[in-house]
Each structure stands twice: as C-alpha cells, then as structure tokens.
Image (cartoon, rainbow, N blue to C red):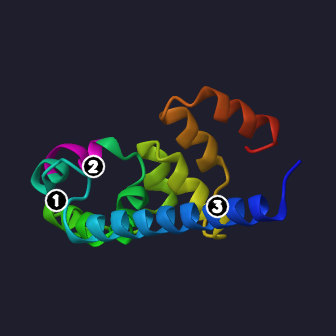
Amino acid sequence: HTTPSTLYSNATLGMETRARKGKRKRCDATAADAGEAFRGLPNHLVATHILNSEHFDDPADLARLPAVSRAMRDAVAATGLRFKEIHGCDAARLGCLSAVQRLQRGGRLSYQERLCQAAARSGQLEKLKGLRADGTP
C-alpha cells in the first residue's frame, strides 16, 4: 500500500532524475560542439582515418555529417573533400545504391534499371532479388 506522500516523493524523484539526464545530454552536446568530433580522438585522426571517402559508398552520407556538430563540421572540412550531386548513371556504375534510391525518391531517376545495376555492382544480392521481385527492370 502506497501513501500519498510516497507517491509525491516518487514523482519528485522521477522529475529530478529526468532533469539530471537532460542536463547531462545538453552538456554532452555542448562538449561535442566545442571540441572533438569523436570523444577521445583528435580531429586530425578522424579526418584522415575515419572520414575517408572509401568508408562511404554514398557521398551524401559524408555530406550530411557537418550537421552533427561544429566539431564534426570542422573534421569533415579538414578532409578537403568537396561534395556534388552524383547522377544516376554514375551512381549505378559505382555501385552507390543509396544514391540511386535517393534519386528515385526525389523523382530524378530516369532509368529504373539503374537500381538493379547499382545493387549488382555493390554485391547486394538480397536487395537485387527484392528489386527484381518488385518488378524493377
């Protein structure tokens, strides 16, 4: 059996805990904005070893990272990479399935067979099977 005072103290405790968690999250976000793209790793190592274009099959994935934090923006800028929209034929030839899918979602993919071509080039057999089962040429 719980008393009204127990319910009040439990509710207060829950509010204090949520407030502490919120403050910790804000502090973590502020720290990420101010310093390192990845906590504990100097930005020059992040730029040269992690943000390497060979780790991203779709250039748009790397292009979205500057929005994460100021530190990530600085780390991406330190790579010296520049971003431009990739066309459907180039994306398919390179095996960038996510780029081809993004073009399709935006209504900018002129040939639907580019989806299968990109899936095949990148070795994504299950994706290729799914596309063919859905009637993609």
Q: Amino acid at mark 3?
A: Gly
SS for tag 3?
Answer: helix
Q: Are marks 1 and 2 in contact (CB under 8 Å)?
A: yes
- Whether residue 131 sits left or right of residue 108 in the image: it is right
Rendered image: mark on residue 14: 3
Q: Earlier in the sequence, mark 1 or mark 3?
A: 3
Which residue sits at x=53%, y=42%?
A: 118
Residue furthest to the right in view is: 1
Q: Which mark is residue 54?
A: none
Q: Main secondary structure of the magenta part?
A: helix
Quadrant showing the C terminus: top right
Q: Which residue is mark 1?
A: 79
- Whether residue 55 appears in magenta in the rendering, the answer is no
The span picked out in magenta is 48-54
- Residue drawn at x 27%, y 49% as measured from the top left: 53
Residue lying at 65% horizontally and 35% vertically, measured from the top left:
127
Q: CA distance from mark 1 to mark 2?
A: 9 Å
Percent position (x, y) of residue 88?
51, 58
Q: Amino acid at mark 1?
A: Thr
Which residue is identified by label 2?
A: 53
Question: Distance of mark 3 from mark 2, alpha carbons?
Answer: 45 Å
Indicate left or right for 12 with 94 as reference. Answer: right
